[in-house]
Amino acid sequence: MNVKLDTKEKFTTITPENKELSANMAEELLSLLESYLQKEIPHIILNMKFIEHLEVEFAEKLLQMQMSFYEHNYSFVFCEIQTSLQPLFEESPNVTPTESEAWDILQMEEIERELLNDLD
């Protein structure tokens, strides 16, 4: 599976470059995403602009992975999902049409975490 990684100061954007994610590629991507739960900068934007075909089961696993990130108090935002795949991600708390909007969500969530930590 080909992916482009773009690491910024507070997050990483992961962009799979395949049009279709087969079962093997899906497991490889899930493993990559899971590894970020152990990293110093765990916040993720998953840019899906190239993906044209995705099995329902894999979309469900991606949504579960997103929830796992939020359970650990980390951000995970989907962006640029193809119109044909959008119904698979209706359950997601964070899907944006552009990568720049995903950056905004991550920044807002970072501010929210800081404010909540100040209240503790």
Image (spheres, rainbow, N blue to C red):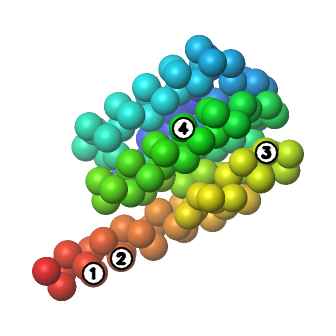
Task: Pick whichever of labels 1 and 3 is earlier in the sequence.
Answer: 3
Q: Left of 102 or right of it: where is 116?
A: left
Dot 3, crowdedness within 10 Å: few (<14), some or many (≥20)?
A: some
Compared to residue 33, the image places residue 9 above or below, namely below
Instruction: Kindly identify the amino acid type of the residue bearing the numbered disc 1.
Output: Leu
Quadrant occupied by the N terminus = top right
- Residues under labels 4 and 3: Cα distance? 14 Å
> Any mark on residue 115, and which?
1
Which residue is found at the position 27% from the left and 74% from the top?
Answer: 114
Q: Which mark is residue 112?
A: 2
Marks 2 & 4, CB-CB < 8 Å contact: no
Dot 2 amino acid type: Glu
Choose the circle earlier in sequence order: 2 or 3.
3
Mark 4: give few (<14), some (14-19) or many (20+) Cα within 10 Å: some
State how many labels appear. Answer: 4
Q: Are marks 1 and 2 in contact (CB under 8 Å)?
A: yes
